[in-house]
Image (cartoon, rainbow, N blue to C red):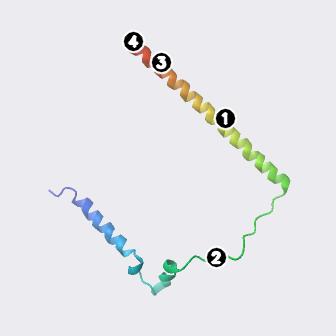
Amino acid sequence: MAYGAGHALDMIKRMAQNRSLRPSNRSKFKENNRDGIYSEPKKYTEKPEWKKIPEEELIKVKEQIRLKAEKEKRKQQILMTVFVVTFILILIGFLILMN
């Protein structure tokens, strides 16, 4: 029986697909594929314009982010405490059953 023949065939097909993706095998003049492979990235001369936010609104947003982070941290602390207490209780119960 041919054990693993499917895996070997899959490997051969993948290698053929990878070879077909090489730049030397791509069409270089049809559909202008050569530019995407061999050109350097364009450098933008214009800087993006950022939206201006009033100082009061910026302070409010920062405060909301801080409050959300504190709530999340508190939630994680409570969850960790519950897990540790549960683990300790399970460990004590296991030790009592072993005696």
How far is the residue under mark 3 from the one under mark 4? 11 Å
Corner quadrant of residue 43 = bottom right
Q: Quadrant of the C terminus?
A: top left
Q: How far apart are the two marked residues, 3 and 2, measured between alpha carbons?
A: 64 Å
CA gap, disc 1 to disc 2? 45 Å
Label 1, on which residue? 74
Mark 2 neighbour class, 10 Å CA radius: few under 14, some 14 to 19, many 20 or more = few
Question: Mark 4 or mark 2: which is in front?
Answer: 2
Q: Is 14 situated left or right of 33 in this image?
A: left
Separation of disc 4 and disc 2 at Cα? Answer: 73 Å
Which amino acid lies under the numbered mark 4 shown in the image of this protein? Answer: Asn
Residue to which mark 2 is pinned: 43
Q: Quarter of the image holding residue 14?
A: bottom left
Q: Where is the N terminus found, in terms of image quarters?
A: bottom left
> In the image, which is nearer the foreground, mark 3 or mark 2?
2
Q: Earlier in the sequence, mark 1 or mark 2?
A: 2
Helix, strand or loop at disc 1?
Answer: helix
Q: What residue is shown at x 77% (from left), y 50% (from top)?
A: 61
Q: Which residue is mark 3?
A: 92
Q: Residues within 10 Å of mark 3 (few under 14, many from 20)?
A: few
The residue labelled by disc 4 is 99
Percent position of residue 81, x then y:
59, 28
Side of 13 relative to 1 (left or right): right
